[in-house]
Image (tube, grey):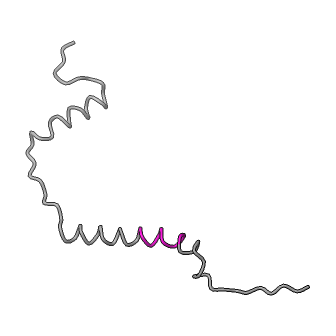
Amino acid sequence: MSTVQTTSSAWREPMVWLVVSGPVSVILASMVTVMLCIRYPDPPLATRATDAAPAQAARNHAATGVVPGARR
């Protein structure tokens, strides 16, 4: 008994399209994201020296454990 094997193109298999569609969609989404970032960039924010004071106090407290302005 001999069996006849028919070979078909890999692109005719639905699983191939399922596997390929994931990376292709990620590449297309990243290209759209880059295009939007280039076309509509965010404007830089004007910062003042006093704006960073709470962040610096929190950073110093986290690093040393000393609460600024607290009395012992």
Residue found at x 35% / y 68%: 30
User: Residue placed farthest to the top in the image?
Assistant: 72
Q: Is residue 54 above or below residue 42?
A: above
- The residue that appears at 30% across and 24% down in the rendered structure is 65
Query: Where does residue 32 sit, x and y in percent of width and height?
Result: 30, 71
Q: Quadrant of the C terminus?
A: top left
Q: Is residue 3 left or right of residue 69?
A: right
Q: Is residue 27 magenta?
A: no
Taking 13 as reference, is 8 above or below it? Answer: below
Q: In which quadrant of the rendered view does residue 64 lie?
A: top left
Side of 71 where 13 appears, left or right: right
Front residue (pair 8, 55): 8
Residue 47 is situated, as x and y percent measured from the top left of the image, at 10, 48
Q: Position of residue 70 (x, y in %)?
A: 19, 18
Residue in the image at 37% along x and 72% along y = 28
- Residue at 23% x, 67% y is 37
Residue 2 appears left or right of 52: right
Our reading of the magenta stretch's main secondary structure is helix
Decide: is 16 above or below 45.
below
On-image quarter of the N terminus: bottom right
Q: Which residues are magenta?
A: 18-26
**Residue 68 coordinates in the image, percent (x, y):** 19, 24
Q: Nearer the viewer, residue 16 or 60?
A: 16
**The furthest residue to the right:** 1
Q: Quadrant of residue 40?
A: bottom left
